Image: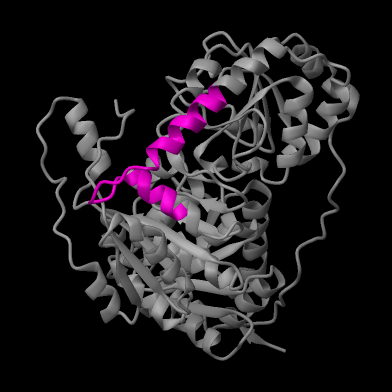
Amino acid sequence: MRKTVAEVILDQLSYYGVKRIYGVTGDTIIGLLDALAKQDQIEFIAVKHESVAAFMASAEAKLTGNLAVCTSTMGPGATNLLNGLGDAYADRAPVLAITGQAPLNKIGTNFQQYVDQQELFKPFATYSANLASEDAIVELLQKATQISLQQRAVTHLSIPKDLFEKETEVEARPLPQVIEGAETFQRDDLEKVASLMKTSKKPMILAGAGAWKATEAIEGLAKLWGAGIITSFGGKGLFEETTPYLLQGIGEGGNPHAPKVFKDADVVLLAGVSWWPEGYVPEKARIIQIDTHIESATSGIPVELAIKGKTEQVVPLLHETIAGHEPNTDWLNSIEQIKTKWAIENEQEGKATDYPLHPSRIVRGIEKSVAKNAILTIDTGDVTVWMNRNFRQSNQNIFFSGYWRSMGFGLPAAIAAKMEKPEEQVVAIVGDGGLEMVLADLLTATRYNLDITVIVFNNGSLQMESDKIQAAGLKEIGTKLTNPDFVKIAEACGWKAFRVHDEDKLESVIQSAIAYAGPSLVDIPTAQAFFPETE
């Protein structure tokens, strides 16, 4: 039975488990939107700006590990996707972007809004193709999806407007079934790694988002090897605060005492992370790295031994290879001293009673109010470093714009997370500047009646940039914000809105907002506190 290209696309995406497509309605994708309107397997999520659509797809892919999809029209619609796709590219989230393109007979001409989209998407898309024949749609979709899932990459298809409604005889088909579990190496292949690990007197493990399936194994390895654990931004939330030898994050916003220990390390294992915090790292340590895509992961890091594989498969094998190893108790004692020292200081920082509220006090209020298994989406800016510094997680899932670090991530990520996990508590923690970049999409949460909470650090400033300008001794311009009344804006968008008027009411206000059955916002007057580690 012949179907249109748009119908085949939806059939094919259904095979991949795609539940929704994020986007903005536009002229060159009306054929796809028509097909979406005529079926109920995949939902079209209409947002206010294409960058938000791409952020939502990136957040969904980070949350699930599955393919997520966004769409836009050609020209400005396609260019607007790029910021969110940059986030997916930088954090290696499997996202497929489908964009409309000029009709076939207008490609390469001066047709309005035409641009070579393959060149446009090249910096972010591992694979980008333009559909030239209706009969090639399944082949291109399969190739794009396989690359996205296997390489954790962004892929892109541009489809001429007139091809969406063309009929074809090709039929959707599932991806080949991949049998998981067989490693490409054996225990004997890791003997060189084990020999190096056994020489260590001061080992450390740096864990990132790629280690989310291996947290227990890493904790066990740290105990056996006698290693401290630190995390990247993307690794925030992987381990509970009480985890032995966990020193929390490192780098801007991390445990301020962790660099002292980390710089003394003689062997470092990188687990599911390709980030190397320059300025905080040991100069003479020997580096071991585990990553599924080691070719790109080692870029810029002085890795001595690289293991190509999944962290959750490799780490248990490392347990076996170093069995019987005697940890260095002096090293572990120094790690525990640093852990205890920071725990005491962190506790004190969260007790500030000033008004407007100190950021550390707000973080402590959030910590006391959110569920142990909540999903927290953190925007980029001053709010990021304070959350990284002071938030003591239990079992929350925490999502950042990790390596791209774009403002405006928090709200779209919360919307996508709630759609994917409607039973979970979802809280977005944002700065006023970041929220203002995506303010219109408060209406998206209203449109879909989403029970999310947005907590706003409202200090009237792009505080992180202000801090850096002050630290450099330069003159400020453009850092002060012209803020609306966020409570009135939220209420006008159909949200329940709260404002914290007293420091001692912080927790009760946040808890009331979270308890509200629908979208809620908490506006918190926030002190313009200089972040202590700003350089």
The number of discs equals: 0
Q: Residue at x 63, y 31 (%)?
A: 295
Residue 115 percent coordinates (x, y):
34, 60
Q: Is residue 245 rendered to the left or right of residue 513?
A: right
Residue 380 percent coordinates (x, y):
37, 48
Residue 209 percent coordinates (x, y):
60, 43
Q: Residue at x 73, y 20 (%)?
A: 226
Is 281 part of what is drawn in magenta? no
User: In the picture shown, does residue 486 fall above or below 25?
Assistant: above
Q: Residue at x 68, y 87 (%)?
A: 2
Residue 269 percent coordinates (x, y):
66, 24
Q: Is residue 443 rendered to the left or right of residue 197?
A: left
Q: Nearer the viewer, residue 185 or 456?
A: 456
Q: Nearer the viewer, residue 110 or 323?
A: 323
Is 340 part of what is drawn in magenta? yes
User: In the picture shown, does residue 137 fall above or below 457?
Assistant: below
Q: Is residue 221 rendered to the left or right of residue 109?
A: right
Q: How is the image coloured?
A: one colour
- Which image quarter is the N terminus in? bottom right
Is the magenta region chiefly helix, strand or loop?
helix
Whether residue 131 appears in this view of the structure is no
- Which image quarter is the C terminus in? top left
Whether residue 238 appears in this view of the structure is yes
Q: Nearer the viewer, residue 304 or 224?
A: 224
Q: Residue at x 20, y 48 (%)?
A: 461
Residue numbers of the magenta segment: 338-366
Q: Nearer the viewer, residue 528 or 534?
A: 528
User: In the picture shown, does residue 535 fall above or below 501?
Assistant: above
Which corner quadrant of the image does residue 202 belong to? top right
